[in-house]
Image (cartoon, rainbow, N blue to C red):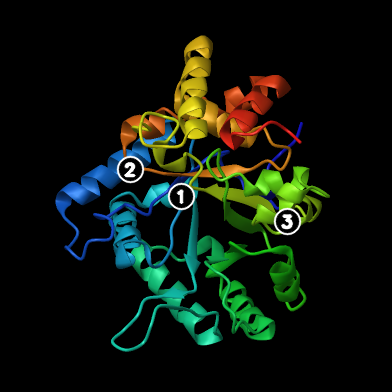
Amino acid sequence: MRVLPLAQRGVTTSRLVLGCMTFGGGWSRDPITKADIQAAEQAIDTALSVGISMFDHANIYGRGKAEETFGTILKGRPALREQIVIQSKCGIRFGEGSIPNRFDFSRAHILEAVDGSLQRLAVDYLDILLLHRPDPLMEPDEVAEAFGQLKATGKVRYFGVSNMNVAQMRFLQRALPDQLAVNQLELSLAHLHWLDQGIHVNQKAGVTVNFAEGLLEYCQTEAIQLQAWGPLAQGRFSGRSVETEPDNIRQTAALVKQMATEKETTPEAIVLGWLMKHPAMIQPVVGSINPQRIAACHAAEQQAQTMTREEWYALYVSARGNPMP
């Protein structure tokens, strides 16, 4: 039986992750309200009730409010910390005055960002820290210094990246004593380059595909956990109006609905199950604070296990809008 790459490293976690980007009122600059905290706590409890024990953050989410909201809940329920896995990210910095938005993998920023996350989350350590988006000015030895200090002080247990290709990961990995544990990428039925790149080898159609060659295979070979952000494609296949969407999206939404009805499950479970059937053991990050939508994902693993090859390809080909080459 295949297991999550994270489990191979000793991280006991759930097959699904709850993304906490909208906690605390989202991106507005309004202060956190009691209602925001109650909504986040309900989302957390719903996630736990359907077996989701991993929570994904970033220091920039809600301009810090997402982590702060989560931390407020943990302060009231300290026993919860040892029951869950907390992952956060750093490396994106917002513009300030004449300074533009930028990426920052400097040692100083990584250390400062982690300290800020720990304070907002009201925890002593992060289970996993990801570098959010590739920094063109990255110096691997400097990143390694920061990671080493964070691990030595017990502030972070495992490290990973987000939105990186093979060359970037190898460039960074050469300076690190421990293997990167995670790469989080946009993967969904609406964002298919990760699959199309593989089937269009030696095909003219491959010139229009924008995905790093060999990335899926590299992560599987090195037991790096692939996580999918945006796995539900903003609800395109699970209830959001698709009247103005292209034919392939509308037809795929109808196919998902049909499958869900036939299997007596939810569209969310079908969409996530399709991702989770892939041999890479993809771990979807469900970005929702809506309890109903979170609960609707509960059967995703079961659907992944029972989905046939023909059903998987039916969804893939429909979403592509083109037959297989």
Q: Nearer the viewer, mark 2 or mark 1?
A: 2
Provide residue 19's location: percent of width, then percent of height. 43, 49
Question: Between residues 160 and 201, which one lies in front from this camera angle?
Answer: 201
Q: Assess whether mark 1 and mark 2 are in contact (beta carbons under 8 angstroms).
A: no
Amino acid type of the residue tagged 3 in the rendering: Leu
**Residue type at the position of mark 1:** Phe
The image quarter in which residue 159 lies: bottom right
Residue sitting at 28 percent across and 52 percent down? 76
Tell me the number on the disc at residue 289: 2
User: Which one is nearer the viewer's eye here, 191 or 325?
Assistant: 325
Q: Please say if 318 is above or below 190.
A: above
Marks 1/3 in contact by CB < 8 Å: the verdict is no
**Looking at the picture, does residue 280 appear above or below residue 109?**
above
Ranked by sequence position, the earlier of labels 1 and 3 is: 1
Of labels 1 and 3, the one closer to you = 3
Pinpoint residue 135: horizontal percent, then vertical percent: 57, 77
Give SS at disc 2: loop
Rendered residue at 52%/21% (across/down): 255
Q: Residue at x 38, y 82 (%)?
A: 100
Q: Is residue 78 left or right of residue 8?
A: left
- Observer-nearest of 149 and 18: 18
User: What residue sits right under mark 3 in the picture?
Assistant: 215
Rendered image: mark on residue 137: none
Residue at x 47%, y 13% (from the top left corner): 261
For residue 55, the mark is: 1
